[in-house]
Image (cartoon, rainbow, N blue to C red):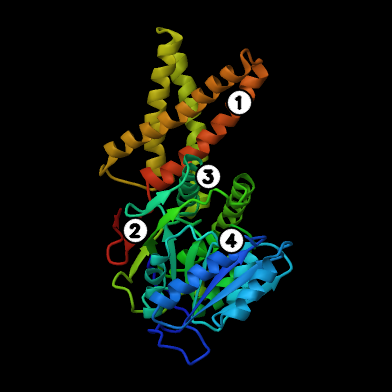
Amino acid sequence: MRTDTHAGTLPAREHLLAEPAGRPVLDVVIPVHNEENDLERCVLRLHEHLTRTFPYSFRITVADNASTDRTPEVAARLARSMTEVRMHRLELKGRGRALRTVWSHSDAPVLAYMDVDLSTDLNALLPLVAPLISGHSDLAIGSRLTRSSRVVRGPKREFISRAYNLILRGSLAARFSDAQCGFKAIRRDVAERLLPMVEDTGWFFDTELLVLAERAGLRIHEVPVDWVDDPDSTVHIVSTATEDLKGVWRVGRALAVGALPLDRLARPFGDDPRDGQLTGVPGGLARQLVGFCAVGALSTVLYLALYSSFRAGAAPQLANAAALLLSAVANTAANRRLTFGVRGRERAMRHQAQGLVVFGIGLALTSGSLAALDAAAGNPSHGTELAVLIAANLAATVLRFLLFRAWVFPERRYTHDDMRYTR
């Protein structure tokens, strides 16, 4: 995780001691909307697990998001029967809104949340919050994408999750591995500063919280989790993904223009052996986008010139392949130097090999789109083919930039001493 040091006003993190009677160390929030069938089973299972394994006092808060079924009644009954359970009713929907509201009013020094389906193995809960209690970290997240995680879910959700996290790495330079896992925790003193800066009230709330925390140099602890997909989940993947992408654009634009006062979240000095290092790519995302577009335009001109030259003595397919290959090599070299600021010969051949892989992925995307159109429409019109090619090439261009930024030319790290960088 990123560990930059900034001068700020957050108090030094201390090991949290047992709180006085009636004031829990941990408050676990369960956001729900129309979950009358699963809520009681979830709360009872979580309560039993915490009673048996958690060495500190705890509270379970059911945050009801404007449910229209019997969910509020079930939650109220659970709160009456168990002293460690309480209920908070909201009249508006939104997971982010629920978490912001409950966390903002909680008196527990460590705040957490998990999804009502309990897809995450509860044995990961203590490892999740332990670094926050000890003062080692500011936030903690469960990750389904580490090598030691065991995950059971369909290929569609797996692809969407990995693609989304790749987008975050490429567009927002995120280093955390899993933004969407419904299993996270934060220290209350950090939440008090961070929550007012998070705008989203829905599913993008998690991502925005983590991106802002990471950019401010806060310490994010990741815990590998075992996770089993809930086949009856009511989450609408397409609409959620659309809103998430809108959120990525909004946060990326704000970061690019420096509209976020991240210095408010700066953590204290002296608690990280890597303090004194600065991470980041000179110029940031906005400069890279401009450079990438400029290089792309020049590469297109080069391709046309090469094709015209080769076509004089070769067949169209051969001339096209040669022009594409040479322009792809030139494009990678130009982006390496101009867009991402990499100099010298170190790893130059590796970067070219990776650039050809990225080029091949883009070519497969455009060619596959035409093949799929032909299979679906039989004999599509020329206008339809052009529309599909334009859309496919736009998607390929975005993917190419993200892969360049996250994989081929990842974020560089400079030191104060000699301004050299390491990967």
CA separation in Å, label 4 and label 3 = 49 Å
Where, by quadrant of the figure, is residue 38 drawn?
A: bottom right
Measuring 67% from the left and 60% from the top, which residue is drawn there? 34
Q: Is residue 84 visible?
A: yes
The amino acid at mark 3 is: Val
The numbered mark at residue 38 is: 4
Asked which secondary structure carries label 4, the reply is loop
Screen quadrant of the N terminus: bottom left
CA separation in Å, label 2 and label 3 = 22 Å
Going from N to C along the chain, the mark reached first, 1 or 2, is 1
Asked which secondary structure carries label 3, the reply is helix
The numbered mark at residue 290 is: 3
Residue annotated with mark 2: 413
Q: Nearer the viewer, mark 1 or mark 2?
A: 1
Q: Nearer the viewer, mark 1 or mark 4?
A: 4
Measuring 43% from the left and 48% from the top, which residue is drawn there? 152
Measuring 42% from the left and 23% from the top, which residue is drawn there? 324
The numbered mark at residue 388 is: 1
Going from N to C along the chain, the mark reached first, 3 or 1, is 3
Q: Is residue 147 above or below residue 58?
A: above
Going from N to C along the chain, the mark reached first, 2 or 3, is 3
Q: Nearer the viewer, mark 2 or mark 4?
A: 4
The amino acid at mark 4 is: Asp
Number of numbered discs on residues: 4
**Are dots 3 and 1 in contact, CB under 8 Å?**
no
Q: Residues within 10 Å of mark 1 (few under 14, many from 20)?
A: some
CA separation in Å, label 1 and label 2 = 40 Å
**Are dots 2 and 3 in contact, CB under 8 Å?**
no
Asked which secondary structure carries label 1, the reply is helix
The numbered mark at residue 213 is: none
Where, by quadrant of the figure, is residue 327 drawn?
A: top left
Q: Is residue 278 above or below residue 56?
A: above
